[in-house]
Image (cartoon, coloured by chain):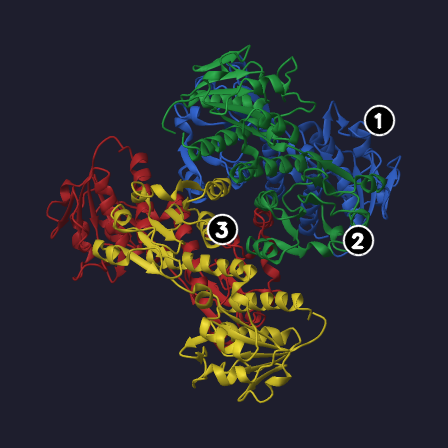
Chain colours: A green, B yellow, C blue, D red
């Protein structure tokens, strides 16, 4: 970017708090609102009102923007913050961005002639977030398994971004990793990266060999039939967003341990996750001509 | 596949020879024509004519199909084989495939109502071929550099399939690897895989730090200006298909060593390359209902 | 081994419980005493007394054998078990082994003409235990750091077994790892494995760059002077056995987070740790002519 | 070191030539004799006689010092150089070093009251040399095998320095690597590093599964009996110094391809090898009080 900017960070969790600190550290003038009390730093001001937000070049809303019922997602703030009066304060000439924008919020923005640019929809943030997600999977596996990852037999279901990084991390720690995927080119990628590979359609019958099964596909790939094939002390980690990939009722009846882990980046590595959001917003600003 | 097939392998190099052996090893009846003298094996017959090719379920042409001037690509055969009379022998009910089919050959096929399915256009073969290509790059670097890969500073330009596997192999051998790419998400991938990353547009000015530069982009990314920045004992490997990515004239004037390596899979690992073609053709046959 | 053996597992924790199950799974006749209630299995009997221990070929005591004050280490048993009457039951023709045998226990054994072979003193068990120790370090780092291991700057102090595996695991997860060691050949090993290396004598002055410092040297290498150089949000993991390597008082005054993690294998991976003990005891039995 | 030194490099190959250049680059005054014509550089003088060698603080002889028959090992020099008159020129107050000093040379030195310190006997140089040796093994395997290293089944016999780095490199490139060793703790190391492991005594009977066998043990471990078990297209690399580990006569009769590769560091990476010698000599000088 050419200039130092006036940036407001409005709402959010530890990731946005870190983001604000990093932006100030890069020399921008940063104001936070509805965000808690970040450690004092040069160029960083905690605001009690939005009265001066009109001076902002860029406004950053949280990931996700809305906490439901038209309220800003602001878990670090003691009060509630309806979204409508907040959006009233912004102007179309400002660069407004946020993560995972729901229909209701989008409607509120449209009524005010605003565009909220979605940083969570950016491919580079999705890739960057796959790293803490994969590490979170490692941490959960270590916490729940009485065996080492080294030597464990691990199946990763799905081979998109999260599947790839997760499979790679477990392999790097000495696990024997297989990948189940639907497409031939994904299986070719898996093989070329040194994983065993099997077609997703034929899961049943060879699930019994695994100590750990990690799902990354947001569709029910581990139904009752497949789960009946899993050995009792196998751990199942579901990293897929809703609706997840595991028939939880069946797993419960079968006595299987399933950990459904959502939103790992913000939980296991908020500082790294905040830095990744910053990099992405910089890319968006650069593309917008800042 | 449901059945054992009658397969003809017509023309080709060591990869097709190995392919024929592997197909026979899987239980198919295999006939070769214009291919040389593979070691005798059960189920494998070397044919002197195409008179019985009408019984074939599947005909496999080489990669590439044509040697130019309407002739079959058959480097292992002592004689020349015009394509037209060969294609005359095939029937539309047979599954005919080949690799990298040029316009002239396609036209010959169309006139005879034939479709030649291109196995080289398949994503899974491209991925599988990226592995021997990356290994070929390692071998060439080892042969040409008086330093170990361990500790060498390596730049990989481009981060598609070949770029990814190549960067990973050099990193695995202890090199310090950076990646230059054009898109933000490719740079995010590079960073998440542990590589340094820089935007392709800003190559100039920081090329002087590398012991080895490997290009994978088939467009001139290393022009005179960039090459002037390269240190004299740096090795440049160009893995990109025509037109390549290096201004060879400028490199020559500057006294830089450039190795332009094409078609590495067939050269460094014909057996593996043949096996990859087999896997791909099986996928194609399965999709075609065999 | 040539024959199935009669083996008694006397006292211990989850590792010994798993060990008993694995031994039974290999076809030996296994009796447990003072060990809790392992899941029933063929060939595995839970005993309420030692009355038939005279039939044992091999007796396995826990790691560590003594809980202090002449009592058997038996955390899974509700009652206390003095060691003397237990040792009274064993005979010199039996193969008796245990882990980390203290002077008092050794004396008790000698009085009874018994040799307790120390499986914990075996190099192969020390190596095998370094793997769960390294994984435990990864788990603790993930739990305590708000950043990903990927990209973190990590210093490993000491480059013995635990140092090597720990450094390698963090590197495999994408951390930038340096090693501090005292001997030139250890530094050469570190460099050849791709780590930065610095002499242990010159720690001070460059500690400030690290996000995570892992000590494996059982001598105070991180005193007040060194700790003053560490940045406030750095995590210090001490994996060294007593007396540890960190001046804990100074660290406390400086507000640094130190986690002193002892006996990780039994905590993070009791099943794997039990299997490693089994392998080691098999090696000892083989060498003893069984 | 405290001061810039006057250093003479006497005899040697490309490694010593590079060594001389690196020493000059570090600010020392360097003279070469019987070494060829290194590129001119500040602080580097090519000498036609030893008349001023009395001013040297340190004299560096080649690796190996003697070419046999009492002659200096000087392959880059057009003339022959008897060792005796050369040693006459040195004084006991100078630090004289060389690599792999034979009995005859040692005797010549003793007669003149000289000690030739052996840099090749230093552990850190042995470790550093294991890296180019392992890379040389990779290069040779790539050149001789028609398959990719990725996916190849590789056996490494022996698990010392060279065995470890070699096994690790092949694993990093995607090979499935097993290790054969004699000691339980070496097998434990192999397993903890993710390799399959088998006892060296039981090689026969499971050698037939390998595409590549790499020996690092300088004793005949692959005799006729073992070789009869090897499959015909398996490549055998022998990295062991004399007498090597393979019965070459038997291998020849069986039609097996054996490559006996000696002194790889100087061949595949003379620059890296020269730098490693420099680091080692610095350590020796530091210990000697320079």
Q: Kindly report the distance in space between the C-alpha atoms of the residues bearing marks 1 and 2.
A: 31 Å
Query: Are labels 1 and 2 assigned to the same chain?
Result: yes
Residue D119 to residue A143: above or below = below
Q: What secondary structure is marked by label 2? A: loop
Q: Which residue is mark 1?
A: C78
Dot 2 alpha-carbon crowd within 10 angstroms: few under 14, some 14 to 19, many 20 or more:
some
Q: Which residue is mark 2?
A: C4
Q: Is residue D165 left or right of residue A230?
A: left
Q: Is residue D179 visible?
A: no
Residue A236's spot in the image, x, y percent?
73, 41
Query: Are labels 3 and 1 assigned to the same chain?
Result: no
Q: Kindly report the distance in space between the C-alpha atoms of the residues bearing marks 3 and 1.
A: 47 Å
Q: Nearer the viewer, mark 2 or mark 3?
A: 3
Q: Which residue is mark 3?
A: D160
Q: What secondary structure is marked by label 1? A: loop
Asked whether the beta carbons under mark 3 and mark 1 sit within 8 Å of each other, the answer is no
Residue C169's spot in the image, x, y percent?
55, 39
């Amino acid at each position: 970017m050419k200039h130092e900017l006036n940036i407001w960070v409005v709402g959010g969790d530890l990731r946005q708090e870190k983001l604000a600190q990093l932006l100030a550290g890069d020399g921008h003038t940063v104001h936070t609102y509805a965000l808690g009390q970040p450690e004092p730093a040069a160029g960083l001001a905690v605001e009690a009102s939005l009265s001066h937000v009109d001076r902002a070049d860029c406004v950053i809303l949280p990931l996700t923007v809305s906490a439901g019922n038209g309220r800003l997602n602001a878990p670090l703030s003691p009060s509630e913050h309806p979204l409508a009066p907040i959006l009233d304060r912004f102007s179309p000439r400002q660069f407004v961005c946020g993560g995972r924008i729901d229909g209701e919020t989008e409607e509120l923005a449209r009524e005010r002639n605003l565009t909220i640019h979605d940083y969570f929809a950016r491919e580079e943030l999705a890739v960057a977030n796959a790293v803490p997600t994969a590490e979170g999977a490692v941490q959960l596996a270590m916490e729940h398994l009485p065996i080492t990852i080294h030597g464990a037999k691990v199946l990763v279901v799905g081979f998109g971004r999260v599947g790839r990084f997760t499979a790679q991390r477990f392999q790097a720690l000495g696990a024997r990793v297989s990948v189940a995927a639907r497409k031939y080119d994904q299986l070719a990628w898996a093989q070329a990266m040194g994983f065993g590979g099997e077609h997703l359609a034929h899961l049943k019958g060879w699930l019994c060999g695994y100590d750990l099964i990690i799902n990354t596909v947001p569709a029910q790939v581990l139904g009752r039939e497949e789960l009946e094939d899993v050995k009792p002390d196998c751990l199942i980690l579901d990293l897929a967003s809703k609706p997840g990939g595991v028939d939880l009722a069946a797993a419960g009846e079968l006595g299987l341990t399933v950990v459904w882990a959502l939103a790992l980046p913000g939980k296991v590595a908020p500082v790294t996750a905040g830095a990744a959001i910053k990099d992405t917003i910089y890319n968006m600003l650069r593309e917008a001509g800042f």
